[in-house]
Image: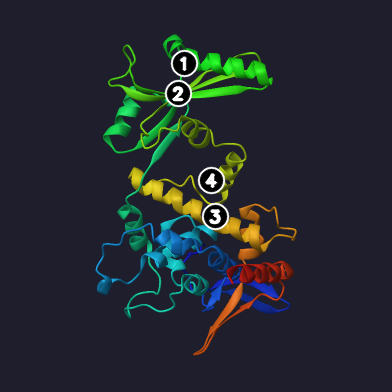
Amino acid sequence: MHTNCSQDSFDFGTAEGRQVVGAFDGGQITSHAGGLLLGASNRAIRLIERLAHCFQDGRDPDALLHTVPTLLGQRIFGIALGYEDLNDHDQLRHDPVLQVLTGKLTARRSNCAALAGKSTLNRLEHAAKVEIILRADSGFARDDLMAWCEDNGVDYIFGLARNERLVKAIRRELALACRESRRTKQAARRFKILEDWETRESWSLPRRVIAKAEWTQGEANPRFLVTSLNWTDDARYLYEDLYCARGDMENRIKECQSDMFAGRTSAASLQANQLRLWLAAFAYVLLCALRRIGLTGTAMAKATCGTIRLKLLKIGALVVTSVRRIKIAMASSCPYQAVFAHAHDRLCNAAR
């Protein structure tokens, strides 16, 4: 017979003549006790408090059930604990450790949970106004994409394939770079902004081009960008710091994508998906703070976020609430108790 997943209890046979049954009726029990270290990490770097100042809350303060810091904390802590879906929060809002982490133990209305459900969190995502800068290689430098960005308030910085006209426009800069390279025996580069650059046929309007005139290994190596960014005339910054910021960051991006679900961009609007990406990034920052501050000197000092979550955050505990305190009794068999204690001490010292 097919077992209904909503049944009250589950039969697991017998052990030494005793019937073994299970049910989801344990009450105040959590599987996220190790997440308390995330709260300590947040206090050490004040991440959520600083992030909340980036939001403008136009809601009526007297009608609020959940403040922006609470909503952001719930979402970021949830992602860090492994829950990328908004749907998960219809149950997670009852989790006692998540309530402790967000500092919200009781609801303002008797018929509501202390924390927000999926619908409220969804409104947070879709209510954000955000600045987006799209960075891509030269294969994306097409007039239709750039025109869409310009029409929709999205800034961009794209690689731009070189041609004879572009190279000719930086002939002087290449000559200077060549002279310096021959003198120093090192690669040399110059930068130039080509304002209102026009193509012969492919672009519908003039655009800003950033040129790098580089001489390396005895030959010219010119490179070009096209961008909508006009708030700085520092061509070197736009090229080196904004466009070419790579290196180990690509590994960190992969970690954020795999462990923090940064690829989960299934919302209907670009703005909501951008905020989801930011929330995943901030959850990653929080776990990095735990690793950088709390886990230095331990076997987990270089562990991935996924490993830290599995071994240190997913700790079962019984939660007992009294008038004066909330006791979170963690599993006595946890094999990482010493690491937990070490991290707790370092994070508390950092927050002082």
Q: Residue furthest bottom?
A: 323
| Mark 1 residue element | loop
Measure the alpha-carbon separation of dots 2 and 1: 7 Å
Q: Residue 81 at x, y = what percent? A: 54, 61
User: Can you identify the residue that label 3 sits on?
Assistant: 285
Are dots 2 and 1 in contact, CB under 8 Å? yes
The amino acid type of the residue labelled 2 equals Lys
Mark nearer the viewer, 3 or 4: 3
Which dot, 4 or 2, sits closer to the camera? 2
8 over 52 or under it: above or below: below
Mark found first going from the N terminus, 3 or 4: 4
Q: Quadrant of residue 226?
A: top left
Residue closest to the eye, 32 or 177: 177
Q: Quadrant of residue 250?
A: top right
Q: Residue at x 65, y 15 (%)?
A: 182
Identify residue for label 1: 170
Foreground mark, 1 or 4? 1
Task: Say if mark 2 contacts mark 3, CB within 8 Å.
Answer: no
Query: Marks 3 and 4, Cα distance to the nearest angstrom?
Result: 13 Å
> Is residue 82 visible to us here?
no
Give residue 225's position: percent from left, percent from top: 44, 25
Ranked by sequence position, the earlier of labels 2 and 3 is 2
Rendered-image quadrant of the C terminus? bottom right
Circle 4 residue: 257
Q: Nearer the viewer, mark 1 or mark 3?
A: 1
Name the N-terminal-most of marks 4 and 2: 2
282 relative to 19 in the view: left or right? left
Which amino acid type corresponds to the residue marked 1 in the rendered image? Ile
- The answer for how far apart the CA atoms under marks 1 and 4 are is 39 Å
Q: CA distance from mark 2 to mark 3?
A: 35 Å
Q: Residue at x 24, y 68 (%)?
A: 60
Secondary structure type for disc 2: strand
